Image (cartoon, rainbow, N blue to C red):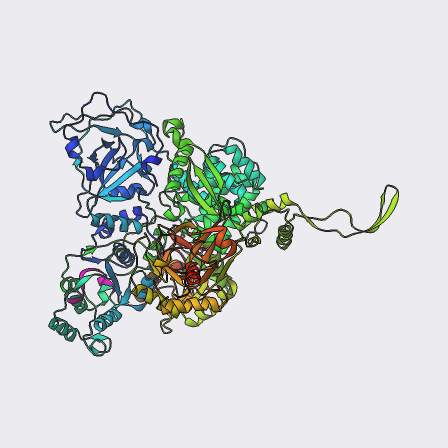
Amino acid sequence: MRLPSYDEIARVEEQLDIWEAPFDQSLLIAGPPGSGKTILAIHRAQMIASAGTQVVLVTFSRMLRRLIALLTENNVPTFTMHQFVGQQHYRRKTGARGAPEVRPLVFDWQAMSSELARRAVRPEQVHIIVDEGQDLPAEFFRYVRRFVARTVTIFADEDQALTDQRSSLLDIKRAACLGDPILLSGNHRNTPEVSRLAEHFHTGRLPASEVHRSPSGERPRITHYSTLAAGAERIANWFSTRGGSVGVVVVHNQTGRQLQKSLRDRLKRGRVDMYTSDQRNEDEIDATTPGITILNKESIKGQEFDTVFIMEVDELLPCTKDAQRRVMYMLCARARDNLVLMHPGNRLPAEVLRSLPGTDVLERP
Amino acid sequence: MSTPSQLPLNVPPTKSEGDAPPANEATALPDEGTDNLPEGWLGIATNHRRLFDASQDGWLRPADHTDLLLGYESFIADAEVPAKANVIPVLLAFDPRGLPFPNARKEERIVEVRDGLEPLPKSIRCTAPLSLHAVVKVQVPCIENRDRLAAMAEQLANVALPGAGIDVGASPVIPMRTLPPVNSDRPAFDLPHNLDAVQGAMATATWAVPRIDPWIDLLTAALQGDAAGVEGGARALRASWLDLPWLVGNRRDDPVDAQAALWRAAVSVMRSPTAQGNSASQLAEKIAQAASLSSAMPMADAWARQTQRLVTAEEPLSCMNWRERGAGLAIQLALLRPEPMSFKAWSKDLPNLPPAVWWGAAALCGWRHGYRALDVRFRGDANLQKFHAVQALKASWKGDVSAVIPGDLRSNVQRRKEDGDCFSLTWGGTTVFRKPWHPRARWFNADLTDAAMAKSARDLASKLNWPCLRTPPIGGKGSLFVAGRELPVDLTAVEWLDHDEFRRQLAIEAGEVPDPPRPPDKLPGFAYLPNFITAEEEDELLQHIDDAEWSTELKRRVQHYGWRYDYGQRQIDESMRLGELPFWADKIAKRLVAKGLVAELPDQVIVNEYCGKQGISPHVDQPKSFAEPVATVSLLESWGMKFRRRGGEEKTEKTLERRSVAVLSGDARYKWTHEIPSRKTERVDGKRIPRERRISLTFRKSRIQEDATSNSPAR
């Protein structure tokens, strides 16, 4: 994985505080998307592991678990919460079969706790680091503190919860007996140029967060492609000259499959993968290595790429409703360095151009 | 690795005459904290933030509006200590003889502060940044601190902690005082403004140097500022435009051609303050404009337009006709992938880049990126970092170099051919850079008078279509008149290889060049069989071995079966008979016979355990005690075994793969020594793999038993 420079870490005081926290100190950290939580979680885990203490990373989603496992090159054990609890249950042999559930995928925390308490199980010398803490139930944190680990570091984003078992920051703080959260702010993912276009689609009460990266001069661009083959040509050229990780967003999976074939024909080197959530093929894709990953607009959530191409923008633009703006905002924010909006057809319709910011923000042909 | 003994002596520390040391000095410095330090060291007590900040480019700068105050053989607190619980106190001791900027601290050796507090011990005030390469000791208060410091550094791309290692211990720290203002007549020393760019370019140029003689010579010329040497070398390599970024600023002559003008423009535009935060297309435009100023050129415009099409991905990058547009191509490479980490991938994505384009672009990339932000993997080891620090300061210092760099640090760098497949650069007796030759270099240095080699070279040249094959001007049937007599002849034109041209092509032309054919095996008597045992058998053997008791009489652990061996006496006698081989060893011994690898059934097995960098020095297995063939089975890891011809220079290395057997007889047994080199890593498939543990089983047949049985048949 790309390691930061010290200047990059030291630029933000809270980031430095987390970075420097002694390894036996429990922490609660909150921050919006793009504030660098996952990366800090990985760094903390790797530091603790290299100092010789046992450490485990726990996430909610399989996709994030996979991403972290790739970034750490499997140096730190990484589990989803369900895997982790199941494994703990097995290890302690607290029951004949799997961990008890009240309904599928919802653990019976009470049953597990009373059994562990009956056996006077005590937490061990291990550091548990949780990412996506907002998506895990508060009972999990209580369980971890009481029976599993003496030290925990929990990263969470209150506004980003996906599940009905979600926890608020206050829930986590109480359940895990932690002090006040360290608040991470700011956008560490996008260049100011990318962020400016994303902000154009920003909705909601909270202001967009401050960008911490330095300008690159590379403005996002909108362009058109007469045929899908011409679009693929453009993406193939880009990848062969720039390298890095390229994410291609499609509205329709069918387009994605055609594009994948077309790109594979054009590129002698490099991988061209397609990910759809129904295929559950995340374990076959290594999105951290240079290459092209094609995803639909739903499955790109939570991921980031050096360059993002958004295909079929005719179906996304112009945005007339807040829901559409939220989608465009989310898609644009996936790009770290470069962003290209790709409009099918022989020209860019005037009403689309009118709805977009000027050339100081978005280049056009 | 800068140990005190390696630090060049330049400015011997002056002991102030007749000045009694402060009364508290002796008691203040407990032995544990300050041993192993050279006399006259200078100390400062700072913290890990300052250390990390300084480690990025190797310079500890004075905090704002202050000077650095260094204790003479004591630690004085740094001006800037953040009041945070998690900040780790760090003590740094410098060897003043290794510090650049001697003049910056010559003036004031002692600072007396008359502020009613205890007198400050002897101290030195420094107006210039301190080079971390002169650090001889880093000390933190406790093990937790040391581990955390090291763990944090590992997670940073651009931090290389001082090579001295981190000690744990307590030493007293003298509080800092507010100092009287600096003497205004003393010159202020600061680092040159383009030092970071120069050092960045030097680092990437060294890292990327095409590993073939003429390029390495060009690099060494450039690193020591030999501008004329670089010019001549580049011309000979048919890339007159190519110049190293740190030399460009001093050129006074006009660029030789349009490509050279473009290159110089790129070097100057990429570091100009107004180009900060510019996109690739903006930079291309500025470069084309600047190039057009020095000579009117439609070519620069065309280049800028083409670059624009590359930037918007309308066309892919191509190396076609690179000879006419080398500079333009190199600049495009650097513009399209400005991050050194992504630049590195060009070598994979465009494996056939011509050396001049690849190398020029790499230097330009480091020039633009700078050293401070550069990933440590481009910087080399501590010796190379120190070397680059000194060369960069020398190259970017505007005035008299002797004022900033101690004399012994000014020695020249030299290229050395190493044994085997490597070359190295040495500087003042230290190896600063060592890499294997490129396959091209092996051709370049091959003996082309050897018929087989010459044929392979002709085949290569014709495959790559290089213009170095010549045909004689005559051929066909006819007559030749010699001394009045007519001789019928039938001449077939045979192509011959122009050696000079072949070598030039190797150095400059693009194309994939495989390794030249290897000379035939020179280790007769060495027999080798991979996968001699199966993975299951390996597991089984390991279990038996690990269940048995180890002897710890040597540094490495050993087990003896059949016969004990006396390492002091270097022989065995009858009293050392231990008995039959255990069944698991016997099974392998019998297989050695069955496969015809040894003639007689071995009756002794020595199990050796090698961990990490453990090895065994060159030796020949006792000919007196043991019969001819010696068989070694390797478990767990594949390590190299080195052979040296006794009384000669020749050496060779064989990899003993995991689960293989190697049998030494004949010359390999008697005329060559063998050894397991002491080193930390093994090269497997071109990758360095850290060593962990290798177990070897050596099977031998004792000679004693033969005698014993013949002398006393009753036994």
Does the segment drawn in magenta span residue A150? yes
Q: Position of residue A306 (x, y in %)?
A: 39, 57
Q: Position of residue B222 (x, y in %)?
A: 48, 37
Q: Position of residue B134 (x, y in %)?
A: 32, 36
Whether residue B630 sits left or right of residue A60 in the image: it is right
Residue B146 visible to an observer of this rendering: yes
Q: Position of residue A216 (x, y in %)?
A: 38, 49
Q: In this rendered view, identify the residue nearer to me: B286 or B272.
A: B272
Whether residue B376 sits left or right of residue A151 in the image: it is right
Q: Quadrant of the C terminus of chain B?
A: bottom left
Q: Is residue A318 above or below residue B189?
A: below
Q: Residue at x 31, y 68 (%)?
A: A62
Q: In this rendered view, identify the residue nearer to me: B428 or A132.
A: B428
Q: Residue furthest top?
A: B18
Q: Residue at x 22, y 53 (%)?
A: A18
Q: Is residue A52 above or below residue B534?
A: above
Label count reads 0
Residue A360 visible to an observer of this rendering: no
Q: Which residues are magenta?
A: A147-160
Instruction: State which quadrant residue B161 falls in.
Output: top left
Does the segment drawn in magenta span residue B371? no
Q: Quadrant of the N terminus of chain B?
A: top left
Q: In this rendered view, identify the residue nearer to me: B455 or B215.
A: B455
